[in-house]
Amino acid sequence: MTIRTLQAPLVLVRALIVVLLLGGVESLHAELPTLRLSVLQFGTAHWELDHLERRGLDHAAGFNLEVRLVANLPASRIAVSSGDVNGAVVDLTWAQARHAAGQSYRYLPYSSQMGDVLAAPGVAIDALGDLRGKRIGVAGGPDSKSWVLLTRAAQAEGVALEREAQVQFGAPPLLSQALRRGQLDVLVTFWHFAAELTAAGEAEVALPMASLLTRLDIPTGLPILGYVFHDEWARDHAALVARFAEAVAQAKRELRDEAGHWAALRPLMRASDDAHFEALRQGYVQGIPEPLDAQRIRALQRLLVLTGVEPGEEMPASLFVQAPSDER
């Protein structure tokens, strides 16, 4: 038998080994529990989950992550409400509203980013009283967290913005354009839209949200955005929720500590230039919340009361997931 004739069986054996190994890996992954999440296609949570999947942090933690992308927030909320997915990213006030309606959700902190109050170039806003008579654009609706906090802080200083300013609610991209065209003096918008405007020099931060929280005696850095899972489902899948919490904490650590990971995320970020990209990266990192403890949960409950929830009707502490510490 020649060397050439020996090589053919060896090649076949090697190929068979590879097939068996790959089949074993696929079988292993198939046996892991699957967690289905709905997030915005161009939302910031997509960045985090894309990194988590690319790094295999889900498999390392013992589950398969399946991300379903949607075009808007209502679609994501419908997906989790209907049970089409296991979880979604929502704001704290939505979770509170569902709790009040008898449909409680477990809340795992995602981000503390709230955006800021921006002013158009040349518009001087040094104090809350300077907002009187101004044309103010508000992203979302009257229940927008940033708007509610701004109005509460203004009320404490005798300023009724609903009556004393010209307020316009709308979609963030449309309001950004209105500010650029000189149709607005002030803009209260989501943080990643604010980052784009400030990075381009088209607006400046007039009133940092942190300063408004301080005026209201609310700690800064509270996670006002979170991953939510229906409470009954979360009780039945407690181990899976815990594994996801650990994988997310690891993803946040890597994105915070290793800037090189962000190059792969840039296509998802739609950054117009390097300054915009860096503003988005820094904004995400600055919004990584500290793990929840009893004190911070009480602060979140106080924040809910401040936004109009009756005392005693806030989400109970048992609904807040105390995620793993991000310190290692």
Image (spheres, helix red, strand yellow):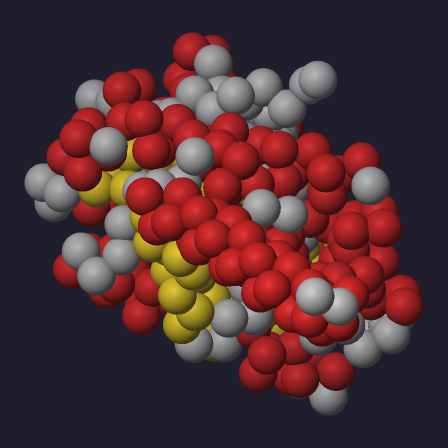
> Compared with residue 59, is residue 88 higher up or lower down, i.e. above or below?
below
How many numbered callouts?
0
Pinpoint residue 199: horizontal percent, then vertical percent: 85, 65
Residue furthest to the bottom in view is: 181
Pinpoint residue 286: horizontal percent, then vertical percent: 72, 40
Viewer-nearest residue: 61 or 261:
61
Q: Residue at x 66, y 77 (%)?
A: 176
Specify whether 223 is left or right of 62.
right
Residue furthest to the left in view is: 102
Q: Residue at x 17, y 30 (%)?
A: 236
Viewer-nearest residue: 234 or 117:
234
Q: Residue at x 25, y 63 (%)?
A: 79
Viewer-nearest residue: 188 or 235:
235
> Compared with residue 81, is residue 172 higher up or lower down, i.e. above or below?
below
Position of the N terminus by quadrant:
bottom right
Specify whether 100 is left or right of 221.
left
Residue furthest to the top in view is: 294
Q: Residue at x 82, y 67 (%)?
A: 276
> Compared with residue 45, is residue 3 higher up or lower down, i.e. above or below?
below
Position of the C terminus by quadrant:
top right
Residue 91 visible here: no
Q: Locate residue 174: give its quadrant.
A: bottom right
Q: Locate residue 274: give its quadrant.
A: bottom right
Residue furthest to the front in view is: 1
Specify whether 291 is left or right of 31.
right
Pinpoint residue 185: horizontal percent, then vertical percent: 70, 72
Q: Locate residue 141: give its quadrant.
A: bottom left
Pinpoint residue 271: horizontal percent, then vertical percent: 77, 72
Residue 17 visible here: yes
